[in-house]
C-alpha cells in the first residue's frame, strides 16, 4: 500500500468506528474549553472532567476567575497536577482576556499562543473544537499511532503534525484528530496493546513495529 492508500484506509476505518465523535473534555464555551485543555496537560481527561465543574461553579468566565486568588485556583485544580504553574496560567490568561480581548477568547493561533501557559497544542484544540477552524492538535495517542501506521517518523510532535496535515485532507482534520485519539485509547494503547483488536495497525502497521510486537509475544 502507498502512503496515500494507508491514509485513506485510516480515514475510512475511523469513519466506521466513530461515525459520531464525542468531545473528550466537557465544556460549554471557548473559555471553559481553553481552561479544560490547559488543565489536561499531564492529566487524564476523566480527571479534568471531575475537576472543571468545581472550578466553573465558582468561575466560568475570565471576570469571575480574576476575583479568585491564584492560591484558591491552585487548591481546586490540585488533583490535575502541575497546579502551581496551571493556576498562575489560568489567572494570568484571564486577566489578559479582559484587558486585551474584551473577555473573549481570541480566534487566532497567534493571539492564543501569546496567553500564559497556552502552547501550540492547546491553541490548536481551541481553534478546532471551539471555533471549527481546521487544526490538527497532536497528543501522545496521535503521535504514537502516526508512527505505528508508518505515516510519520516519530521524530517529534511538530513533525507528526506536519505529516498529518500533509497527508490528510484539511476538511477532515477536526474530525480525524479526535477519531485517532479515541481509537488510540480503545484499540492501540501504549500499554496492554492487543494487535488482534487493532485492525488499522494490523493492516498497515510499520514493519519494525509489527516485528517488535510479535517478538515480544513469543
Image (cartoon, rainbow, N blue to C red):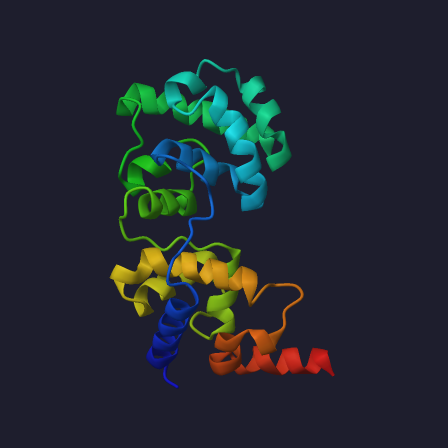
Please state which of residues 69 and 129 is positioned toward the viewer in this rendering: 129
Taking the spot 32% from the left edge, 44% from the top edge, the residue there is 127
Q: How many marks?
A: 0
Q: Is residue 156 visible?
A: no
Q: Position of residue 195 (x, y in %)?
A: 60, 76
Please state which of residues 61 and 216 is positioned toward the viewer in this rendering: 61
Taking the spot 32% from the left edge, 42% from the top edge, the residue there is 130
**Residue 10 in the image: above or below residue 31:** below
Q: Is residue 26 visible?
A: yes
Q: Position of residue 57 (x, y in %)?
A: 49, 23
**Residue 63 in the image: above or below residue 120:** above
Taking the spot 37% from the left edge, 66% from the top edge, the residue there is 163
Residue at the outermost top position: 67
28 on left or right of 214: left
Q: Position of residue 193 (x, y in %)?
A: 63, 69
Please state which of residues 63 and 92 is positioned toward the viewer in this rendering: 63
Q: Quadrant of residue 211?
A: bottom right
Taking the spot 35% from the left edge, 46% from the top edge, the residue there is 129
84 on left or right of 124: right
Q: Quadrant of residue 76?
A: top right
Image quadrant holding the C terminus, namely bottom right
Image quadrant holding the N terminus, namely bottom left
Amino acid at each position: 500500500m502507498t502512503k496515500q492508500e494507508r491514509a485513506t484506509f485510516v480515514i475510512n476505518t475511523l469513519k466506521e468506528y466513530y461515525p459520531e465523535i464525542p468531545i473528550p473534555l466537557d465544556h460549554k464555551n471557548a473559555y471553559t474549553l481553553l481552561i479544560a485543555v490547559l488543565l489536561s496537560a499531564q492529566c487524564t481527561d476523566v480527571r479534568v472532567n471531575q475537576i472543571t465543574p468545581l472550578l466553573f461553579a465558582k468561575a466560568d468566565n475570565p471576570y469571575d476567575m480574576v476575583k479568585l486568588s491564584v492560591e484558591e485556583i491552585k487548591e481546586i485544580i490540585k488533583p490535575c497536577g502541575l497546579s502551581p504553574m496551571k493556576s498562575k496560567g489560568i489567572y494570568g490568561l484571564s486577566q489578559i482576556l479582559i484587558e486585551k480581548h474584551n473577555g473573549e477568547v481570541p480566534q487566532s493561533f497567534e493571539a492564543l499562543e501569546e496567553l500564559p501557559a497556552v502552547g501550540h497544542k492547546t491553541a490548536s484544540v481551541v481553534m478546532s473544537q471551539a471555533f471549527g477552524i481546521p487544526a490538527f492538535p497532536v497528543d501522545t495517542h496521535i503521535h504514537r499511532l502516526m508512527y505505528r501506521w508508518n505515516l510519520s517518523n516519530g521524530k517529534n510532535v511538530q513533525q507528526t503534525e506536519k505529516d498529518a496535515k500533509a497527508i490528510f485532507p484539511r476538511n477532515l482534520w477536526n474530525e480525524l484528530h479526535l477519531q485517532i485519539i479515541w481509537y488510540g485509547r480503545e484499540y492501540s494503547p501504549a500499554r496492554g496493546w492487543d494487535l488482534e483488536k487493532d485492525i488499522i495497525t494490523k493492516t498497515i502497521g510499520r514493519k519494525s513495529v509489527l516485528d517488535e510486537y510479535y517478538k515480544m509475544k513469543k
